[in-house]
Image (spheres, rainbow, N blue to C red):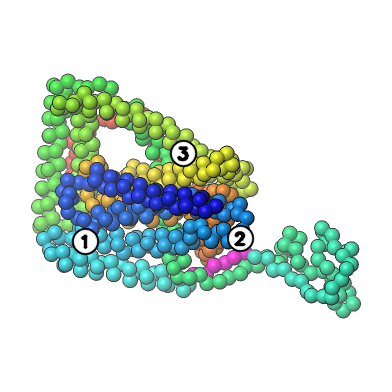
Amino acid sequence: MGDYNVVLLLIVIVVTLMVLAFNLYLLINYQHPDDKNQAWFPKVVVIVGLSVAELSILMLPADIANRHACKHSVYTDACNYTLPMRELWYSVYIVDAVLVFFVVPFSIFYYEADQEKSWLRRACSAISWVVATAIILGILFGVAFVLVGKVDFGVQRLESSAQAYTTDFSLVTSMSPCLATNQGGTATRVSCSAELADPESATTWTMRTSFPEYVIAILTIVGSILFSIFGGVGIASLPLSLIFAYVHRPKTIITRSQYIKEATELGNRAKQIKEAALALQREQRSGSKSRKWKTNVHKVQKELMYLEEDERALEEVYPQGEKADTSWALTVLGYLGGLVFGIIGLLVSVVWVVHIIIYMLITPPLTPFLNWIFIRLDNFWGLLGTVAFAFFCCYLLIAVISGQMHLSLNILFVAIHPMKLNGTYMSSFLFNVELVLICSISVIQFCAKSFAVYAQATVVQEIFGHTLESLRGIKYLFEYNVFQYAFLVCAGLATAHYLTFGCRKKRTRSKFQLE
């Protein structure tokens, strides 16, 4: 048993180092050239934020593996030598909340402050914005906590009375499991069996939750809303975008004359965008920032993103330099790899949707499905089921990130920042890290409920299976599976969109005009 725990601890350390290395690699390859060798604090926040979000998901299989470490123990103190999962979970929640409410917003305000100001003035300005936001949120959370910060548990009230010891149990049957009591010379029976109790015995036990638990619950609700949208869209767009990218892949290299023609058109479009941007800049300096101006700014930013996409596509079909052949071969292999991952992802997405329907939405569940598969895999070989469980949970987080990338909408009047290879500013990084951190808690809750059979008797089940789903006002969202239905609706709409428009080739973009 001791060897098993040592191996589990080593796995946790190795996985943590791998996650940090992956996020560092992601930051280096996606950051904009203008942010190189500067903006160090936002970069640290990005790496830490992504690592916390990813490790929180990987803690689910670690929790299950930790439970297995003392499942078949002979001595009662075996579980005292496993990982302290309860303390680890609470630590993750605290770090997640601090990052979401304080650190990431401070980094965004600090990064987007006027660069001509000193670092001290920018820091003071960012702190003032964060403090003001924290005060407003604290007041809102405090009022909500005082009014409805209670937990309503559904219980049954059973009654029994004490009587002298007896050896006569002849009257005790399966339909009448309670001993009769004498009241006024008449033998009566009391309600001591939950299965045979009258419906009137059902009642509600109310208690007030703690303020930190209530804040986590509110954060989970906000994250569940975003998760239903991003996760639903991402679970369809993630595989389908890779498959349709292969369908519309460049089949051959274009000629030099075709390249010159396409490059000339891109140059003309770039000139139009520059002229529009200068016109908006002059309008801004004049002090006129109307709603029409903001719409035009968003339109220019969107057109600039399209221009960059078309430029990358042109570079793919006309590789230049001494390694042009190698570049083209890597492009072809990249699309083939995308097709393979797209097909695998499509199978995983279909399995996820089927599992949600037959296990979470149908009462009683038709079958445990994935829960049963994970248990069988564990019985076949050690932690094989845990590894498969981790894969499905991580795939859901990747789907959420994919949904953020593919969904071109506005949330609270803030445009979603796209992630581009060698073209992502730290503000976009921080914005997406904020969304991932908020959604990660909801992914944990969603997976804990989806795999309740496999994850039973774990610490995460205790946290998400009782208090959160019994909070007054909030519990109905979980009782009626609101988020699951919203998830499937978004997945259906995204699938219909890709099947309708994904099979069409991109048309040549026409000249855009400001309003």
**Residue linked to disc 3:** 349
Quarter of the rendering containing residue 438: bottom left
- Picture coordinates of residue 471, whole percent (x, y): 52, 64
Residue type at mark 1 is Tyr
Residue 56 forms part of the magenta stretch: no
Of callouts 3 and 2, the N-terminal one: 2
Instruction: Write the residue at 45% across / 70% down.
Output: 211
Is disc 1 surrounded by few (<14), some (14 to 19) or many (20+) residues within 10 Å? many
Instruction: Write the residue at 41% across / 62% down.
Output: 91
- Picture coordinates of residue 247, whole percent (x, y): 34, 27
User: In screen coordinates, is 171 left or right of 329?
Assistant: right
Instruction: Write the residue at 28% across / 22% down.
Output: 251
**Which SS type dominates the magenta stretch?**
strand
| Number of on-image labels | 3
Find out whether the residues at labels 3 and 2 contact each other: C-beta distance under 8 Å: no
Of callouts 3 and 1, the N-terminal one: 1
Find out whether the residues at labels 2 and 1 contact each other: C-beta distance under 8 Å: no
Q: Is residue 304 visible?
A: yes
Q: Is residue 479 visible?
A: no
**Residue linked to disc 2:** 76
User: In screen coordinates, is 390 left or right of 197?
Assistant: left
Alpha-carbon span between mark 3 and mark 2: 41 Å
- Region rendered in magenta: 149-154
Residue type at mark 3 is Ser
**Residue linked to disc 1:** 110
Looking at this rendering, what residue extends furthest in the bottom direction?
Answer: 184
Question: Considering only vertical position in the picture, is 215 above or below 456?
Answer: below
- Picture coordinates of residue 260, whole percent (x, y): 13, 26
Alpha-carbon span between mark 3 and mark 1: 39 Å
Q: Nearer the viewer, residue 234 or 473?
A: 234
